[in-house]
Amino acid sequence: MTAKFVDKIDPYHKANIRKHRKSEGSSRYHDKEASELQPLPLLKDADAGEQPALLVKKFGQCCYLFDFYDPTTDIKSKEVKRSCLNELIEHMTTNRGVLTEAVYPELLKMIATNIFRPLPPNENAFFDPEEDDPNLEPAWPHLQLVYEIFLRFLETPDFQPNIAKKYIDQKFVLQMLDLFDAEDPRERDSLKTVLHRIYGKFLGLRAFIRKHINNIFLRFIYETEQFNGIGELLEILGSIINGFALPLKAEHKQFLLKVLVPLHKVRSLSLYHAQLAYCVVQFIEKDATLAEPVVRGLLKYWPKTCSQKEVMFLGEMEEILDVIDPAEFPKIADPFFRQMARCVSSSHFQIAERALYYWNNEYIVNLIEENINLVMPIMFPPLYRISKEHWNQSILTLVYNVLKTLMEINSSLFNELTANYKAELTKEKMREKDREELWQRLERLELSSSAASNPENSSRTAESSKADVKTDSPSSSRT
């Protein structure tokens, strides 16, 4: 009663604007109820000649789907299917020669029937993946086993890609990629492993898979900004990039600069930043000349108001500098350290602290030492200013350590910059003083000119002021 009353008083109460997530079905439609399943004979008890036909029957039995929204319905049939799936996993694991050519279509039909389905729409417009629990798939007890069968199928020594490619084609892969938008992280993790195996087994599908992952990313960046499986797809790409042959093809470089770098500007970057940073660093390790366009791209998308994203950017930039070629460092030193100067000057202590931690990295300090004449003139003024006025004591300690390091690297340049900075401060104080005096003179000139232009008003003002003085005199008060 109280909650309803509060809602009526406050129309902006959180309960009013945030929808409650309700339980979903098994994310598929049911035209009719499945008939009750009957257990089939065990494969291990059947004769060798009967096993292929029985195996096909079991695959067909596993094509029946059940509604897991209501746990009280089809209990026996669900258990029969679960037992059958477990038996298939054991049979494929412990026996050789199971995958005959006749088994391929039946096995892949069973997999497609179970995993391919329309995903339920997200009914919560305010869903936050970082804070809210995902919508778990109720049919996962069966789906998990189906994915396990699929994985064992792809990894078995008897697997023949020439036969399987008739059924695992471009349409099949597209349907798999659509499933990466599922909210259940368990399913996305299984999809990631399976798609990676498919990429390794089917050479003819590799370009197609990369192209459509590219399309998913572009749609995510420029249209929807909503797709649950970005992190998993980036994990797959991390392994793919690691296997790229050198020199890198132009299409791979374009993918880095036109897709991976713009992925940094999306609001939900924190959900997949670790995987994205790994992919970017992999490219730079493959081709050192990519460091400059990547760094300039990151500076272009550098966050202005989100401290959490800025800290992530600083972490990624340190990973890039860890692998950058010393010959490429001078090309990015000027724009990068100008951004660093803004970061160390930030009033947000986490940003300033993360930027100052760069001087704890021995390789980066060596790069700075080799380019000290370029770096120190940029970094010295903000560091010196912060050392006098920053509010956080830990930041002051880090700044003193950085200034000490810079002084040890090149003491003569340090002393010269110190003298120049103090001289500039003195000049600034003189300019400020001159500016104040100029305004005071202007105010006096304005008063004198206004008095000269209105002598009558000024005389009346003088007479009224004299009258006021007489009125306030002691004699008048006695009277």
Image (cartoon, grey):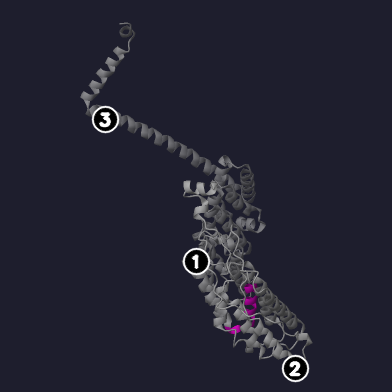
Which is more toward the observer, 91 or 252? 91
Which amino acid lies under the numbered mark 2 shown in the image of this protein? Answer: Gly
Helix, strand, or loop for circle 1? helix
Instruction: Give yes or no for residue 194 being in the magenta stretch.
Output: yes
Q: Which of 205 and 430 is in front in this view?
A: 205
Q: Label 2: which residue?
A: 49
Our reading of the magenta stretch's main secondary structure is: helix
Kindly identify the amino acid type of the residue bearing the numbered disc 1: Ile
Residue 363 percent location from the top left of the image: 65, 59
Residue 52, percent from left and from top: 71, 90
The disc placed on residue 221 is 1
Q: Is residue 249 visible?
A: no
Q: Nearest the camera: 478 or 77?
A: 77
Residue at 47% x, 46% y is: 9
Q: How many marks?
A: 3
* Label 3 SS: helix
Boundaries of the magenta span? 190-204
Residue farthest bottom in this picture: 49
Which of disc 3 and disc 1 is earlier in sequence?
Answer: 1
435 to the left or right of 68 = left
Q: In this view, does 418 lie above or below 328?
A: above
Circle on res. 449: 3
Q: Report the Cα–Cα distance between label 1 and label 3.
A: 62 Å
